[in-house]
Image (cartoon, rainbow, N blue to C red):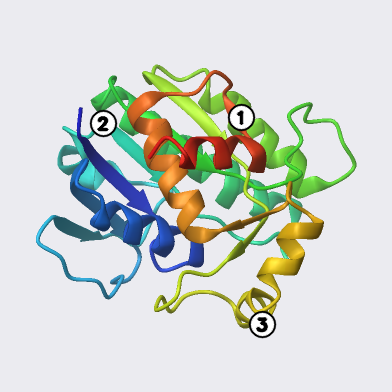
Amino acid sequence: MKLKAIVTGATGMVGEGVLHECLLRDDVEAVLVIGRRPCGVSHPKLKEIIHRDFLDITPIEKELKGYNACFFCLGRSSVGMSAEDYYRVTYDLTLHVAGILARNNPDMVFCYVSGLGTDSTERGRVRWARVKGKVENDLMKLPFRKAYGIRPGFMKPTPGLKNAPSYYRALGALYRPLRALFPKYITTLGEVGNAMINVALRGYDRPVLEVDDLLKMVKKN
């Protein structure tokens, strides 16, 4: 099987990294990027749709058919946001997009990048973790072939890519000692991207992948 994948968040660090790995892999035959602004990448197997309002993607629904994977890397920090606004741009937006994709692509594998510390119980003290836990839980109720929560920790940026925050670049110089000290929390962005592609191709025995699980899937490349 080869993937025809949709990638969101390609102007952010994780989405850009996942897109980069998709374009390198022969088992990904086509990629559709949906974004609010151009991702700045050109490639023969890449198509791009610019769409400003992710809370309503019905105007582009017909263009989203025929894909068997989605790498949903779109997200915002909760810092400085009201609870209502964070819920709207995290839960409502993601479930709206996922619902339309599930309706049009029942054979799709949907990989949602949530993050280390996401709260599957939805009852913890940390607001962002509760909301992302609810997103993961409700995505898995949609009629996809499979949905997964992807929970990377710190990621060393991929050399040559441009969307990593400056503090990620600074800490990247400490990658080797940090990984030796905290192996359950540290990966490279390339490892995360390749693990997500392998999950979409081959599946995984648990619906939520922590750092250890992602590293296991990299080895199946």
Q: On the image, numbered disc 1 is attached to which residue?
A: 208
Q: Tell me if 202 is positioned left or right of 78 in this view.
A: left
Instruction: Answer whether labels 3 and 1 touch (C-beta < 8 Å).
Output: no
Q: Which of 216 and 157 is in front in this view?
A: 216
Residue type pointed to by label 3: Ala
Marks 3 and 2: which is nearer the front?
3
Residue at (43%, 79%) from the top-left corner? 162
Of the numbered discs 3 and 1, the one sitting upstream in the chain is 3
Give coordinates of residue 113: x percent, y percent. Answer: 54, 45
Helix, strand or loop under label 3: helix
Q: On the image, numbered disc 3 is attached to which residue?
A: 170
Residue at (34%, 50%) from the top-left corner? 7
Q: Residue 220, labelled with which disc? A: none
Location of residue 155 (image quadrant): bottom right
Helix, strand or loop under label 2: loop
Q: On the image, numbered disc 2 is attached to which residue?
A: 68
